[in-house]
Amino acid sequence: MATGILARRLRALVGDDGVVDADDVLLVYECDGYTLERAAPELVVLPRTPAETAAVVRLLAEERVAFVPRGAGTGLSGGTLPLAAPVMVCTSRLREIESIDLRNRRLVAQAGVVNSWVTRAVQGDRLLYAPDPSSQTACTIGGNVAENSGGPHTLKYGVTVNHVLGVELVLPSGEVVRLGGAVEDRPGPDLVGFVVGSEGTLGITTRATLRLVRAPEAVRTLLAIFDSVDAASEAVSDVIASGIVPAALEMMDRLVLQAVEQAFSAGFPADAGAVLLVELDGPAAGLEEQAEAVSAVCRRNGSREIRVARDEAERALLWKARKRAFGAVGRLAPNYCTQDGVVPRSRLPEIVRAIAATAERHRLRIGNLLHAGDGNIHPVILFDERDADEVRRVIEAGHEILAACVALGGSLSGEHGIGVEKIGQMPLLFSPDDLLAMTRLKAVFDPEGRANPHKVVPDAKVCVEARAPRRQAAM
Amino acid sequence: MSAPSGDHAAALAALASELGADAVREAGPGDLVDGVAPFAVVRPADAEQARRAVAIAVRGGIALVASGLGRHLSIGAPPRHLGLLLRMDRVDRVVEHHAADMTVTVEAGCTLAALDERLRRAGQWLPLDPPAPAETTVGGLVAANLAGPLRASQGGVRDLLLGIETVSGEGVVVRGGGRVVKNVAGYDLPRLHVGALGSLGVVLAATFKTVPVPPGEGAVEVEVASPREACDLALALRDAFEPAWLELVAEAGGPATRVVFGCAGLPPEVACGLLRARTETEARGHRAVEVEDATALRARLAEFPLREAAAILRVSTLPDRTGLALESLARAARDCGVRAPLSAQVASGIARAAIADAVAVAPVLRALRARREDPDAAVVVERASAEVKPRLVGDADPWGDPGESLALVRGVKRALDPGGILSPGRLPGGV
């Protein structure tokens, strides 16, 4: 069907303002937070309700048109890049929180509900939605479900999949299935767990039943300054070994600290090698003891200075360095790109050394922001995109770092997803038999291969070549 | 038991030659699965032998059920066919416990008790406390999605499982997930196997997140007049302090019901939790009694699903309807003239009744389903003796309505087990 006719039929379903087909507006949709590759869809459809979404997908099924689902476009692995998919289905107008059940700690949100709205809706009742990606004021629940998003507090609370009890999924055929729901432990295999993190390749999530957790009664935040990443990593190991599971355990290395210091004087010593940000939460009883135990562990591992937040304002101050780190690093060079890899937590010193070696080999500056508690690393590579040779080195360095993560027993992605960015490296992690199983499972949901084609699982049909690294990234 | 047919004899010969004669034997009367007899029992010595055993079954088109020590085989519908019982209990290594990384990789046949012993050396545990840990293997834990009281605070298998290694229904090793605590690379195969009763692959090994053992544990008990009152009190206690576990027990089948509130953590946390629970209880005019050995009580409560009974019925519902679910179970049992001890896990919305009389199971189940007092609830026969299983047909199917995901589950089954040889028929909808 010609694009014009398809656009007309889609407008009949979702209203005139629900279809974007003007070239200049389509440019907005040519990439997400991963700007390395760009491709604008032919049409963007913005349904207003879950039912309209299903109607749109049914029409696309009738016409055998492939599509890419998209939430707010904050993804960092190119999951919403249209590859052989002319239509983008945007769920950002599905903005209703449909029900809140405080007693049972459940909330049903449509896909376009922004992550932070969920907590805002229930915080007066001392509840919250735990997954907190740093893009949480923009990213949507639908996108979080697709990517199985994390955030700094996943160490204690888990990621999206641990907080999604049910999804309503529009299959690529247009059929709607409700998987799971407010009631836990339904008989049979855990299809909800399978759909979460499937990056929009199995269909479009239109609603999700979320688990709410009790907001912590009390929080203690402390920041410890170390001479080296090794010393800070040892402190992390000792904290874990002491039996304390902090809510967050973040690390920044020297380059990042210097950038932060330059951008806004946080008062870090010029020769500081690493900073640990530790957050403990729970009932007030016992929290002080835990904070003291963490301080003692840090001191024992050579921390030269420990700052403890005494109130919410001081806590915000300690988090400021961490939260603004990307922006601060961004000032050091015309461009930067962020990688996302995972290593077993105890291998952090090794991966940081490997990253330093990679940086030296490729004559690049690489800073490290680390979700140290769960071994999730975010190396930030600085470069100038006008320097083609440097850009090539940046891409090579990124691949080398991920390969090093896998070699240390880790993974290609902790929270950004595979998308198009890392699809070429999936064979590092999975055998052909593993990948074949994934391909067949995809076909169960999407036999015609029309939902977000050529993502997550590599196939022989499309070779995704990395050309330029993405410039910005937020976690 | 009839003599092995030609195909069976060929498979037996292949198994004996590839795995060694001591790994294979003809099945006996003790090897039945829900009353269905396999012709042989295979007991591989390691993961590779297990893979080869499955591959031989694939070649011969022979259906198999994987089992650890057989303690939980009464879960699910009876297998539609059965040739081999694959006993995984010798595939039992703890492959690696990285305490500093808070992960453990363990083979399917390792018991939870053995795993626990190992993890505790480093001050950690896998915070899942299903019944009979000494007779429950890791494979069974995953396949049957087992849990216990700690489910209230620690989540279930799906929340702790990081990676899995299986043999598919084509005899091929398929891995998913990984050995790190945070990982979003590729489709989440591990979770697909949770609760799949081995029908999507035979579990060879699994990687879990481990956590520090809390240094203290305490509990209080409160007796109230009815399950519904108990449920209300339990939720009020949960709002006063986040419990580690929260159980309701009515040994006599109600109405008198005990609320057991357990908390864990550092000693001051435990003390604070118990104090708040007592204060909240007394404010409601009840009396809270401190439990002497909370850990031992939790272990006893965890055993409910394995108590002597013809069947365990389970209602899964919302937390605030667990009281209602217990009352429905009690009434249905009473109407059918049986006594049914009751137990519930409020935070996860699970209510159970142990039905003593085999003849009563199907009528109680039908009565519960017919009333549909709670439209969101799933009423299932969690476990039943081989004597009961044949009666559980039609509207007394152990699983009940398989729901709208049935077509997808069938598809997933075909994708991973195209020949339909792994635990055929055991899942909802006869999958």
Image: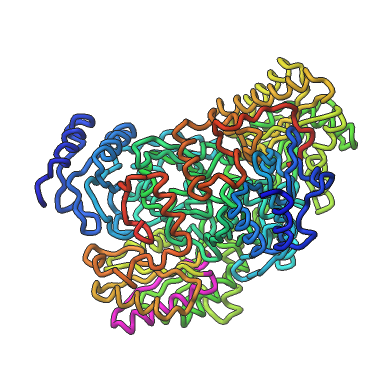
Q: Is residue A213 visible?
A: no
Q: Is residue A305 visible?
A: yes
Q: Is residue A444 left or right of residue A222?
A: left
Looking at the image, which is closer to me, B278 or B46? B46
Q: Is residue B337 magenta?
A: yes
What residue do we see at 37% from left, 57% from top?
A: B427
Q: Quadrant of residue B388?
A: bottom left
How far from the left and from the top, in percent, is residue B119? 45, 41
Above or below, comparing residue A359 to residue B328 in the picture: above
Q: Is residue A309 magenta?
A: no
What residue do we see at 35% from left, 47% from top?
A: B137
Residue found at the very far bottom of the displayed protein: B335
Looking at the image, which is closer to me, A274 or B359? B359
How far from the left and from the top, in percent, is residue B70? 28, 51
- The magenta region covers B318-347
Q: Quadrant of residue A409?
A: top right
Q: Is residue B165 left or right of residue A405?
A: left
Q: Is residue B417 left or right of residue A453?
A: left
Looking at the image, which is closer to me, A3 or B320? A3
Q: Is residue A202 left or right of residue A2?
A: left
